[in-house]
Structures are given as C-alpha cells and as structure tokens.
Amino acid sequence: MARLARLVILGVSVGLMCPLTVRAQFPSELVGYNGPPIDDPVTSQEMFRQPEFSGSTVDYIVANVDPYDNNSAFRASGLHTEGAAAMNVLFNWIDNGNPNAWVRLTTFDGPIRPNPSLDTRGRVRFKLTNRSELFTGDIGVCLGIRETGGVDIPQMADGGSIGAIEWVGATSVMTDPNDPATITGPVPAIILPPSSDEYVLEWDLATGEVWVDGTHYTGGIAGFTGNGDLSDAPDNRGTLEHIAITNVDTDTATLIEFAIDELQFEATVPDPTPPPVIRGPVTEADTQVEVECISEATAAELFIDDGSVGTETPVGGVATFGGLTLDVGNVLTATQTANGNTSDPSAPVVVYEAGTALAENFDGYGSQEDLEALWTQTDPANERKVLLASGSASSCQNFVVSDYGPGPTVSKLYLSTGAIDGSDAAPLLVTYRFKTDVNNTNARARFELGTALNRAPGALGFAFSNGVGGSWADQYTSMTLKTLADDDDTIDGYVDDYFGYDYALTGIDRVAGV
C-alpha cells in the first residue's frame, strides 16, 4: 500500500523539503533495536516499557489478560528499516471515540537503555512505520522530555528519572472538561495515518519544531508536569521520558501497531568521554587484558596499581594490551580518549588466582571512600546504604553492614565481575559469610549474583536472603532472579512472587547473631 495522501499536520508548514540536519551538531549512537534476541515479547524488551505500564494512560487501552496479548513493546522483525528488527509497539483503544485517549510509551527505568539522556537544546529523530489496521489507525505523535539535569552524562546513557516533563512537538494540551485546569494529555503537531512506508521524524527540542520526511512544520513546547519551557532545564540535560501517542477520535481503528527504528539524538556539544570497561575476570595466569571502548575512541591506556603500561589503539571497539605479567591483588584501571577528551578511570578490576572470579574480605579498605572506589553504590546519596565496618566480624578484620531503619528505598553495593557464566558441567561456586543481628519478619538482606542491576525480562541469576516476610521469615531462602511473574515459568520447588523473584526455603533456620 502506498503512503496515503492524508498526512495531517496540525502545525503550520513554513517550508518544503528542508534538510533534516539544519545545524552541525554531535550525534549519538544510532539505536536500531536489533537484539538479539528478537520476536519474543518477554525477552526482547529494550528501552520502552509496555504501553499499559504508565498509570497516566493505562485506563485508555485494553489491559493484558495473558502476558502481552493486548499491548506490548519489544524488538521484532517485519517493520524494521535497517538491521534485523525494530521496536514494535501494539495496543488497543478501549474507546476509539475518546478525544482525550493517549498512551505514554515511557522509558522510565526500562530494560536496556533506561531513561536515555539527551541535550535539551538538541534534536531527536527516528523512523516510524504505522501499520495499525492498514487503512485506519491514525495517531498523533510528540515527545515527552524530562528535565533531569546532570553533567558528564553521555547521550543515550541513563539520565535518571526525576524532574519535570515537557511535551515537544505539541501545539497545545488536552484538559479535563470538568476541570479545565487539569491537563490530561498533549495535542501533537502531527498526525500520521497508516502507511507501508516509514515516516522520518525529527524534533528540535529548543523550539518544538517538527520535520516529517524532510518537510518542516511548526510545533511547540507544552508543559505536562513542567512549565512549557526546556531552556531552563538544569545543565541543559534531560531524558526521552516517553513518546506520546494520541487517539484521533474521528478514526475507526481500535488496534494500533507501529514500529520505531533508527533512534538517534543530537547534542550541541560533544559528549563527555565515558570510562572504558576492562573485560574481566582477570587472573594471574593472563598475559593479555582487553579494554572495551566507545566507537569514537582513538586510544586507551592501561594502568596496573596506578602505573601506566602504555597506550593501545582500539580495533573494533577493543584495545588489547599484551605481554603483561600480573600478580594476585593487582588493581587494573584504564582510560580512553575520544574527541580529544580523556575519560576518567574505569571501574577497577582486581587480579585473582586462576579459576577465581571474585575474592573479597574487605580488609584492604581503610575507609568508606576506599571501599566505594572499587565497589559502587547504586544510590550514593541515600543514607540507607551498605557501609564498611570493623571490629566484630566472625572471620575478617573488616566487613560490610546494612544497619538502618525502615524506609522505601535502599542503595545496593555492587561490583561488576565481568563476563563470567556457569553451566551444569562447570557451575559457579560462591562461598560467603552472612550474619544477622535481628530476626524481624520485615528485615532482610541478600547476596545477589545476576546478569545486571536492571534485569531484563528473563534474566537469570541467584540470591541468598536472610528471609522474606510472612511464612518465609523463619528460614533463609534461595531466590532466582527472573522477572517473569508467571507460574508457567516458575522453577520446580520454588514459588513466584509479585516482584518477579522465585523463592525456595533452604531448610536452614534464621537465628539472630549467627
């Protein structure tokens, strides 16, 4: 089907076939949503949450009964414009005649690339293919930009989830007919009918102007939870908080299905050069160390116990340092240079004995600052966090302790172990000492080994906890770190919970002080 001739532009056309890149700026990486995996709504999620995730708009679409039957967002083939897949989005309007219906397709703490950071003076572009019901299914499209602030955050990195939200590419806002002061949604400057061809879309975040297939149209900036102005965003930084998809009440479609591909941001200044990543684990038997760099990096430098061993040029995003002599306990760090800027040092990697991925007794740290130079707090400003202590550990001079009252949030202390994996033939073995001074049904702490802090659906790992509330409070428990709240995916002998963990009792009673 050729593109329908009824593309509706609510803004005013001020020119024809203007080039998409009006100003010379600094582009981010191009996100193609190619996986792997693809074509599985459970394991192929990236960046965007399911359409029903946002409480702002969940009442406008049909909820899932079985997982992902009525709305979903995942990497899938079929409507992609490059590579193997695109971000495929599907949902059904409850009332396709409701002029206030819209979907907040949010990136809020999403799986893989959550809260993607951007320059609020820059641009956002992507390609969108609207299939919907082939001849019906018009949608309005604009952007929700969260003003998060934050210096030295590269484009597409996690920019955080706190700050006011402005709509970009909107001509006005929808309001509650019974309370005109209450904003219910945006009115996008463009409406896109179904088409077999992709639309090339671009927004200027500074002005709210929109380009559709190279044609420039006047949009604007409107406040959702903000003041309708992005120029006062802290540090000129924000995130793509959501893409707003609005209903066209004169259209008869119920099913809306479209794909997003080739997402890219542009900034007015170069990105800061992020620290590289040393591939671990590294053992004393290794004579070679690999350092993962960004594509723009022209050099990487490796340090052993703060002493430089020289620089190497990355090839295919990896700088390889050979001919090394390593000892147990050496601390490796690295920097990379890109766009003339040298990064801060990478996260340290400790050299272990052959066959060991991690060995830690915490005795080598003289202060909390020393500890957090190697281990990372997920929320450093949070007072409820794991602290270095000494004097009463059962086997070590030092230990780490969680000692705080109840609260809604907590900072995890974590260390990246690099690319390690276990199998039935060669399982990972973990030994550690664990002590609890209280036996409160609401008090728990756990050791956790998983694929990532932000676990993607289906990601596996394990944890060992000093208990869960209710009937689980009397024994230590083992947990698997999957994110599927589905009994069909629960491991035999375990029970599922609403956080997406599976629990099983170990048979070991919880005893305070042991």
Image: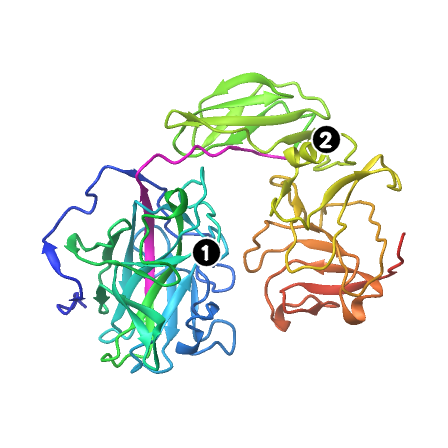
**Residue 239 place in picture, x, y as percent:** 40, 51
The residue that disc 1 covers is 46
Above or below, 346 against 52 in this view is: above
Amino acid type, label 2: Ala
| Sequence order check, earlier mark of 1 and 2 | 1
Q: Which residues are magenta?
A: 258-281
Q: Above or below — where is 414 with respect to 13? A: above
* Residue 195 seen by the camera: no
Image position of 28 (left or right of 16)? right
Residue at image mark 2: 354
Point out the frontmost of discs 1 and 2: 1
Answer whether residue 271 is magenta in the image.
yes
Question: Which type of secondary structure does the marked residue at label 2 adopt?
Answer: loop
Cα separation, mark 1 vs mark 2, equals 35 Å
Element at label 1:
loop
Question: Which residue sits at x=16%, y=46%?
Answer: 19
Question: For the residue carrying disc 2, how many other residues have a C-alpha within 10 Å: few (<14), some (14-19), or many (20+)?
Answer: few
